[in-house]
């Protein structure tokens, strides 16, 4: 019998996936030793800033790069 191993979610990905904003739950994070990259699409610049602030709050000393695209037609 083979057990399925799941990787633990990072604090940054958990912060986004548990957000009260549905758009933020669809975003992804890629982490390295000294940086966090946020990727995905949102409908407005406000949501992009919310994603940045959400991740920055739990990122510690890591730099946060927000590569989220704003697609106003997403709504």
Image (tube, helix red, strand yellow):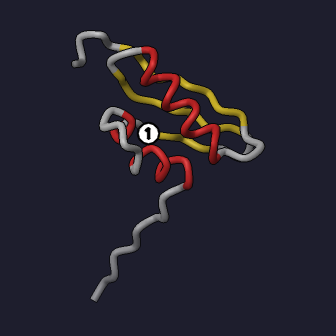
Residue beneath the point at 45% across and 19% down? 46
Dot 1: few (<14), some (14–19), or many (≥20) neighbours within 10 Å?
some
- The residue pinned by badge 1 equals 28
Vertical comparison of 68 with 29: above or below: above
Instruction: From the viewer's perspective, tell me whether residue 18 is left or right of residue 37.
Output: left
Q: Nearer the viewer, residue 16 or 20?
A: 20
Vertical comparison of 56 with 60: above or below: above
Quarter holding the C terminus is: top left
Residue beneath the point at 49% across and 29% down? 50
Residue beneath the point at 46% across and 30% down? 39
Vertical comparison of 39 with 2: above or below: above
Q: Nearer the viewer, residue 28 or 6?
A: 28
List x then y, in percent, for residue 17.
39, 48
Splitting the image into 4 quarters, where does residue 63 fall? top right
Residue beneath the point at 55% across and 47% down? 12
Looking at the rendered structure, the secondary structure element under dot 1 is strand
Q: Residue furthest bottom?
A: 1
Instruction: From the viewer's perspective, tell me whether residue 60 is left or right of residue 66.
Output: right
């Amino acid at each position: 019998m083979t057990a399925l191993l799941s990787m633990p979610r990072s604090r940054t990905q958990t912060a986004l996936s548990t957000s009260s904003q549905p758009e933020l739950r669809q975003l992804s994070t890629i982490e390295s030793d000294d940086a966090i990259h946020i990727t995905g699409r949102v409908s407005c610049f406000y949501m992009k800033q919310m994603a940045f602030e959400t991740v920055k709050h739990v990122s510690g000393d890591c730099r946060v790069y927000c590569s989220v695209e704003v697609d106003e037609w997403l709504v």
